[in-house]
């Protein structure tokens, strides 16, 4: 093993690193002949000619490896915990989210939305619901239902963000298929509201309720939670003010929604109190860059703050 590797840090010239990466060589197996043992171009070429250098591990495998179960257990006393085996859903969630963080270049955009007009509109819409035979309203929409509709329409207004990245082409979608994160025992699943831009808030509300119920019963079909172009993850009901969500491939964005709360704002130069909701858009930089993500978030804000447009 080289002095470089024993020290725990590999010193190599940029050209040597590039040549080693292209050839799949492990720099730690090389001995540097440059100043202070630095690996230089001739060392890489010499190793390639001699065939004695060790191949570098595949980046994907190296990234995906985590501490083994036994390696983790050794930090804790044997009687200090209860072991709950992973079910297939938890394993699938862990695998997909790990792949997402490792393979999708995330970046995040945050914006505040004033939602007093939305809350008033929702209250009036719910109050207009006819009563059923049991005396209960036939519908009751949530703020999240309006958020899903607003995101779907925003993607229609900014069609360049209504896309999916593939290695050889960008898939530009006609419909806005929006996932809705649903917490269920043992994990999280994201059923898809197809053609959300064309559905009423009432229809979206009913569909989310029905899909969420079947999700908790583990009765969703794959076509009901696979695909989509974006998603909404709302933790406002848990008191969370803001957070960043992990993109669920092949989707290109996900909107993390915090709680609405009364905050001091300035209106026309005067202090005022408004209900503010913070949202964070996670973007796949391969598909949606900063300016495009900002345009999408601006379109969403405009729709949420002028909610009558959701019924147009």
Image (spheres, rainbow, N blue to C red):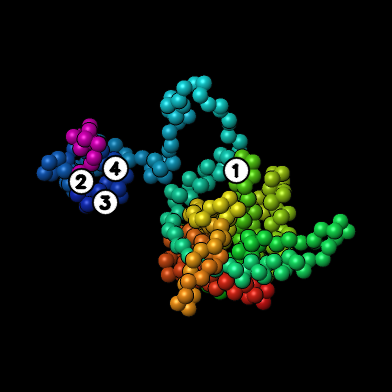
Q: Nearer the viewer, residue 24 or 287?
A: 287
Q: Nearer the viewer, mark 3 or mark 2?
A: 2
- Tell me if residue 144 can be seen: yes
The residue wearing badge 4 is 25
Q: Residue at x 12, y 41 (%)?
A: 36
Q: Nearer the viewer, residue 63 or 27?
A: 63
Q: Report the residue at 55% width, 73% height from top.
A: 302
Percent x, y for residue 1?
22, 32
Q: Secondary structure at mark 2?
A: loop
In terms of sequence position, does the residue under pointer 3 or pointer 2 come before the other? 2
| Mark 4 element type | loop
How far is disc 4 from disc 3 in space, using C-alphas? 10 Å
Give the foreground label among 2 and 1. Answer: 1
In this orientation, which residue lies closer to the viewer: 130 or 189? Answer: 130
* Neighbours of disc 1 within 10 Å: few (<14), some (14-19), many (20+): some
The relative height of residue 58 versus residue 285 in the rendered view (above or below) is above
The magenta segment: 1-12
Residue wearing tag 1:
187
Label 2 neighbour load within 10 Å: few <14, some 14-19, many 20+: many
The earlier-in-sequence mark between 4 and 2 is 2
- Residue corresponding to mark 3: 18
- The residue furthest bottom is 268
Query: Separation of disc 4 and disc 2 at Cα?
Result: 13 Å
């Amino acid at each position: 093993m080289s002095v470089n590797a024993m020290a725990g840090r590999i010193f190599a010239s940029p050209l040597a690193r590039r040549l080693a990466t292209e050839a799949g060589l492990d720099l730690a197996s090389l001995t540097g002949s440059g100043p202070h043992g630095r690996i230089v171009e001739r060392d890489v070429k010499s190793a390639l000619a001699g065939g004695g250098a060790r191949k570098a591990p595949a980046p994907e495998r190296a990234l995906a490896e985590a501490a083994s179960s036994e390696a983790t257990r050794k930090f804790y006393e044997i009687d200090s915990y209860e072991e709950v085996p992973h079910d297939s859903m938890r394993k699938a969630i862990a695998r997909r989210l790990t792949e997402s963080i490792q393979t999708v270049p995330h970046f995040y955009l945050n914006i505040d939305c004033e939602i007093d007009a939305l809350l008033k509109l929702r209250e009036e819409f719910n109050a207009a619901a006819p009563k059923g035979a049991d005396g209960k309203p036939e519908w009751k929409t949530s703020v999240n239902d309006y958020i899903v509709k607003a995101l779907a329409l925003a993607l229609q207004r900014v069609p360049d963000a209504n896309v999916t990245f593939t290695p050889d082409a960008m898939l530009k979608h006609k419909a806005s298929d929006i996932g809705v994160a649903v917490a269920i025992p043992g994990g999280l699943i994201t059923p898809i509201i197809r053609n959300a831009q064309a559905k009423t808030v009432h229809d979206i509300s009913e569909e989310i309720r029905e899909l969420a119920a079947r999700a908790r019963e583990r009765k969703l079909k794959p076509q009901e939670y696979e695909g989509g172009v974006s998603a909404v993850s709302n933790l406002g009901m848990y008191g969370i003010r803001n957070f960043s969500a992990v993109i669920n491939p092949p989707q290109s964005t996900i909107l993390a929604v915090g709680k609405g709360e009364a905050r001091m704002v300035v209106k026309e130069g005067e202090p005022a109190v408004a209900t503010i909701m913070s949202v964070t858009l996670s973007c796949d930089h391969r598909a949606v860059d900063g300016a495009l993500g900002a345009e999408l978030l601006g379109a969403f804000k405009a729709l949420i703050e002028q909610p009558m447009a959701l019924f147009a």
